[in-house]
Image: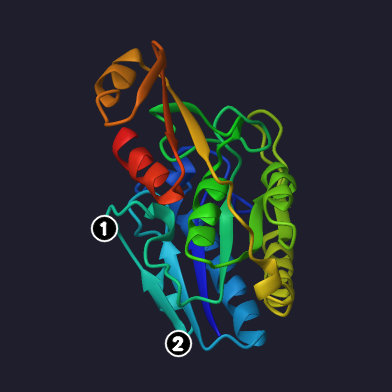
Amino acid sequence: MKVFISADIEGTAITATREGCRPGEFEYEHSRREMTAEVVAAAEGARAAGADLVVVKDAHGPGLNILPEELPEYVQLIRSWSHAPEMMVEGLDESFDAALFVGYHNAAAEEGNSLSHTINGGVVHRITVNGRPGSEFLIYSWMAAWYGVPSVFLAGDRALCEVGKTLHPSLVTVPVKDDVGGRSQGLSPALAHRLIREGAERALRQDLAAARITLPEHFRVELTYKSHRDAYTKGFYPGAERVDAVTLAYEADDWYEVNRFLLFAI
C-alpha cells in the first residue's frame, strides 16, 4: 500500500497564534515539533494498516517545518515547493492508494479555528466553491479525487472535521482542537497522537475503492480578496470574471483548471 499525507500546522492540537506558525518567532519550534509528531502518528497508523511507503508533503509556509530526523524509515518527505497547481498535495498521483490530511484548519471567514484561512491569509478574505466555503481540505482532497485517490483521514479542528465528512462520506476524522474566537483549546499532545495513530489505521483498513468520490461536473469558484488591487490585477487571468471590486469568479468543468487559476490568482 502507498499512502500520501499532506500536513499543515494551524490545525495541530497546540498551535494557537500566527507567531507559532512563522519560522523564527515565539512558539514556532514548539509548533513544528507537534506538527512532526502528528505526522509520525499518522504514518505509524498507515504502517500498521499495511502501508509499504508513506509520502509526506510538508504543506505549510516554506515547506520546511517537519523535522526529517524524526521520521520512520518507510517515510519519504517532500519539502519546499515546485509551485505546481497541486500545491498542498504536490507529489500525489494515481499511484497512491489513499490520501491523509493532518494539521488542517477551517476555511477563511469561517469559525472553529483561531487561525482559519485559505491558502494565503494575508490576501484571501473568502473562497467559495459551488456556493460552499472553500477550505484547503476541500480544494486539495478534491485534487486527490481528480487523480482517483480517496481521502480517508482528516485530523484538525472540530469545525473542519464536521464539514469534511460531508465531502467524503467514508472519511475518518480526529478533531484535536475546538477554538472559539481567538482562544484555542486542544487535546493533550499524547492523546492527539494516539487518536491520530488509531484513526489513520482504521481509515486505511476500510474498502478504499468504495471511499472514492465523484467530483461535481462543473465548478464555479468565487475568490474574494482583502484588497481591490489584487482583484484588479488577477482579473486579467484568462476566463476570470469581475463580480465586484474585490471578487473574481472562475468557472470550469475540470478541477485541475480551477487549481491552475487559484495558483496564479492568489
Q: Mark 1 is on which residue type? A: Ser
Q: Residue at x 68, y 67 (%)?
A: 211
Residue 90 against residue 97 in the figure, above or below: above
* Location of residue 233 (image quadrant): top left
SS class of the residue under badge 2?
loop
Distance Cα–Cα, label 1 vs label 2: 24 Å
Circles 1 and 2, Cβ within 8 Å, touching? The answer is no
* Mark toward the start of the polypeptide (1 vs 2): 2
> Residue at label 2?
73
> Residue at label 1?
82
Point out the image quarter for the C terminus. Answer: top left
User: With 68 as the anchor, is 141 left or right in this view?
Assistant: right
Tell me residue 237's x, y (percent): 27, 30
Residue 32: numbered disc: none
Q: Residue placed farthest to the top in the image?
A: 245
Residue 209 against residue 14 in the figure, above or below: below
Q: Residue at x 70, y 50 (%)?
A: 161
Q: Mark 1, residues whose alpha carbon is within 10 Å: few (<14), some, or many (≥20)?
A: few
Tell me residue 216's x, y (percent): 59, 46
Residue 254 against residue 191 in the figure, above or below: above
Q: Mark 2 is on which residue type? A: Glu
Point out the image quarter for the N terminus. Answer: bottom right
User: With 197 as the anchor, is 101 left or right in this view?
Assistant: left
Total marks shown come to 2
Q: Residue at x 30, y 59 (%)?
A: 80
Q: Which of these two is toward me, 230 or 59?
A: 230
For the question of whether residue 41 can be seen, the reply is yes
